[in-house]
Image (tube, grey):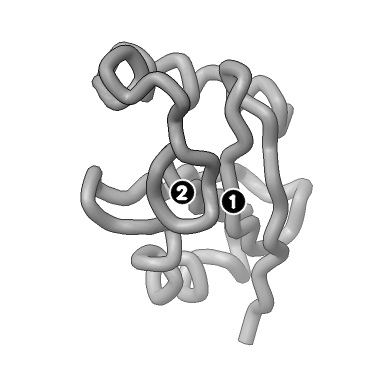
Amino acid sequence: MASPVSLYVSSAGRQLHVMDWGPRDAPVVVAWHGLARTGRDMDDLAQHLSPRYRVVCPDTIGRGLSQWSPDPGEEYQLSFYARLARGLLDALG
């Protein structure tokens, strides 16, 4: 059974919690949860894929262990979520 690594990544000025599964040098799959859930919802999928893939399962801001937004009106919307996703991918290389 693969064991994930829990880490925090800075993206768009916010701290995102990420469960990082599988070999770091494997092809990457990003499994991002729905708006009312957490990255841990992806555990079964990540465990299944992690022998062959690096599976990155972030918590969106305001969910799971990620930072809550200090400006919900501006940041809890799709355009900011897209910025978070781009920043997360950049931070993880």
Residue at which label 2 appears: 59
User: Given the image, on which type of amino acid does mark 2 rest?
Assistant: Asp
* Quarter of the rendering containing residue 32: top left
Give neighbour class at mark 2: few <14, some 14-19, many 20+ (Cα, 10 Å). Answer: many
Q: How many marks?
A: 2
79, above or below 30, in the image:
above
Position of residue 78 measured from the top left corner of the image (x, y, whole percent): 26, 20
Residue at 24%, 44% (x, y): give it. 35
Give neighbour class at mark 1: few <14, some 14-19, many 20+ (Cα, 10 Å). Answer: many
Residue at 50%, 47% (x, y): give it. 58
Disc 1 vs disc 2: Cβ atoms closer than 8 Å? yes
Position of residue 41 measured from the top left corner of the image (x, y, whole percent): 35, 66
Q: Earlier in the sequence, mark 1 or mark 2?
A: 1
Q: Looking at this view, is 7 or 55 the one in front?
A: 7
Q: Looking at this view, is 85 or 52 the one in front?
A: 85
* Residue 18's disc number: 1
